[in-house]
Amino acid sequence: MLTQFQWFSLISILLVTLAGGWLPLSRPEEARRNDGFPLGKPFACGVFLALSLVMMLPSSIHLLGRATRTHPFR
């Protein structure tokens, strides 16, 4: 089962990914100017952001666990 920190990280990654894909699509007036806005770019940005955060999450949890063993603020 996931810990509270892992749930928080998972939900924040999901929200940031959705915001990164939705934000450019929410401005259709800018899509009409400057030769339009391709729909593949926001999707690709969201995918790359999610993949980079998911790949870094296990190592950051490991490093945080090592750091909290030596410090009393756990």
Image (cartoon, rainbow, N blue to C red):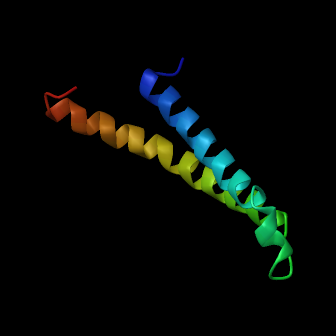
Horizontal and vertical percent position of residue 62: 38, 39
Front position in the image: 60 or 36: 36
- Quarter of image, res 29: bottom right
Q: In the rendered image of this protein, does residue 45 appear above or below residue 66?
A: below
Q: Where is residue 47 in the image (x, y as percent from the top left)?
A: 70, 54
In the image, is residue 1 above or below residue 44?
above
Q: Is residue 52 left or right of residue 29?
A: left
Q: Position of residue 23 (x, y in %)?
A: 68, 55
Instruction: Identify which residue, 37 or 33, lies in the foreground.
Output: 33
- Please name the residue shown 75% across and 55% down the image: 26
* Residue at the front extreme of this rendering: 29
Task: Decide which of 28, 69 is in the foreground and name it.
Answer: 28
Residue lying at 46% horizontally and 21% vertically, measured from the top left: 3
41 left or right, relative to 18: right
As drawn, is 40 to the left or to the right of 49?
right
Residue located at (44% from left, 22% from top):
4
Q: Quadrant of residue 63?
A: top left
The mark tally for this picture is: 0
Quadrant assignment for the C terminus:
top left
Quadrant of residue 42 in the image?
A: bottom right
* 37 is higher (above) or lower (below) than 9: below
